Amino acid sequence: MSTALALLADLAGDEADTHAVWILRRGIGDATYGGGEAGRLPARGALGLRAKAAVEKGHAGAVTGFRTRAVERDGDRLVLVAEDGRRLDPVDEVIVLTGFPPTSPSSPRSASASRPPSPR
């Protein structure tokens, strides 16, 4: 998850209208960001630190304790609705991740070149 969040935060830094929101079923703890410098896998720890910095700098937000019940349309945007009734602000795109190691061939790093061009 940290891999995707770090890459989306990089995109948000490059594109002023882009903001990533990280939605977690659980709260944020030490293991959320891959263990940081104390993690068993250095690459995961480094990505975790990038993800943590992205949240702290405001390039990405984090919503915790959110279990998605439904995805609704709001015009051409999407709204996630939680089991407890919370509704997130409308978004353009939802990327669903269930976990993968940072060196996985299916990680967003290998797909980062496929980002759509900026509508400039």
Image (cartoon, rainbow, N blue to C red):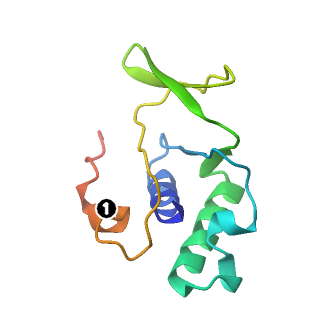
Of residues 112 and 23, the one drawn nearer to the viewer in this rendering: 23
31 to the left or right of 13: right
Residue at 43 percent across and 65 percent down: it is 100
Residue at 48 percent across and 30 percent down: it is 91
Image quadrant where one finds the C terminus: top left
User: On the image, which quarter does residue 34 sit in?
Assistant: bottom right
Type of residue at label 1? Ser
Element carrying mark 1: helix
User: On the image, which quarter does residue 112 sit in?
Assistant: bottom left
| Residue 104 screen position, x and y as percent | 35, 72
70 is higher (above) or lower (below) than 43: above
96 to the left or right of 29: left
| Residue 15 screen position, x and y as percent | 44, 49
Question: Could you classify mark 1 by the number of other residues whose Cα lies within 10 Å: few (under 14), some (14-19), or many (20 or more)?
Answer: few
User: On the image, which quarter does residue 78 sit in?
Assistant: top left
57 to the left or right of 60: right
- In the picture of the structure, the residue carrying the numbered disc 1 is 112
Residue 78 in sight: yes
| Residue 30 screen position, x and y as percent | 74, 68
Of residues 30 and 49, the one drawn nearer to the viewer in this rendering: 30
Of residues 61 and 24, the one drawn nearer to the viewer in this rendering: 24
- Numbered-mark total: 1
Residue 53 in sight: no
Residue at 35 percent across and 67 percent down: it is 109
12 is higher (above) or lower (below) than 79: below
43 is higher (above) or lower (below) than 69: below
